[in-house]
Image (spheres, helix red, strand yellow):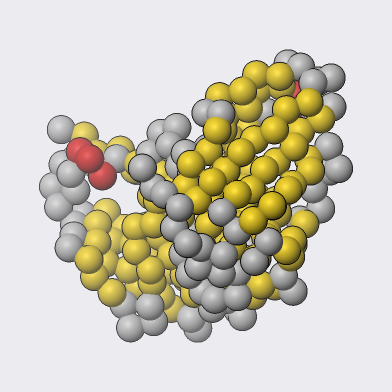
Amino acid sequence: ETGVTQTPRHLVMGMTNKKSLKCEQHLGHNAMYWYKQSAKKPLELMFVYNFKEQTENNSVPSRFSPECPNSSHLFLHLHTLQPEDSALYLCASSQDAGQNYGYTFGSGTRLTVV
Amino acid sequence: RKEVEQDPGPFNVPEGATVAFNCTYSNSASQSFFWYRQDCRKEPKLLMSVYSSGNEDGRFTAQLNRASQYISLLIRDSKLSDSATYLCVVNGLTGGGNKLTFGTGTQLKVEL
């Protein structure tokens, strides 16, 4: 257990479905991140939240919608996804986004879009 | 040029061998550097930070060469349990704050 919990672990959804990924951290961190990991590609940063404020949106399509109600919780709302969106979605947290800390990752949600 | 570049491997080595991985990065303004380890179908986990003076943690030694913009990881006396993908990670400041950029990883397979 890393202190960052992601649910669900696996998700299969159709292209017309709406689903949400959840991330919760118990580390007292103030920054949270969503990353996408596709096969044979490096982790891609999607969103950064620092003290509940979104500070970076890395040109992510609008079919991905993040929500950060407080410093401990982060959601990724999904709608009308494409098969190429199938990937491992990783949540991470760090002390805050303004310093050079390493990140703690959750176990990820493996998403399959059919 | 990729922001962080690594040889994907795989590196197949016998148990007890010494193996070294290199990584290059493109942003000369990068501020901090890490090696992460990722096991198959698991999340990345921080292995060690990398400092200009070089740092060692047991069998693992990390080095940073800012002038040449490369980072290395040396693993001595390899164990079967060292089999994993090793991710080179570079941290730089963006307009939104701290941002980690990951390499694609180097796969290590330690064999009997």
| In front of the other: B85 or B15 | B85
Asked whether the viewer can see residue A99, the reply is: yes
| In front of the other: B105 or A79 | A79
Point 56% across, 29% down: residue = A8
Asked whether the viewer can see residue B9, the reply is: no
Residue B75 appears in which quarter of the rendering?
Answer: bottom left
Q: Is residue B42 left or right of residue A10?
A: left
Q: Is residue B18 left or right of residue B25?
A: left
Point 76% across, 56% down: residue = A58
| Outermost residue, front side | A70
Point 61% across, 38% down: residue = A22
| In front of the other: A24 or B22 | A24
Point 39% across, 57% down: residue = B46
Q: Quadrant of the N terminus of chain A?
A: top left
Q: Position of residue B66 (x, y in %)?
A: 48, 81
Q: Position of residue B109 (x, y in %)?
A: 30, 38
Rendered view: B70 above or below B59? below
Rendered view: A111 above or below B38? above
Q: Is residue B76 left or right of residue A64?
A: left
Q: Position of residue A32 (x, y in %)?
A: 60, 57
Rendered view: B48 above or below A66? below
Q: Position of residue A20 (x, y in %)?
A: 70, 33
Q: Quadrant of the C terminus of chain A?
A: top right
Give the mark count: 0
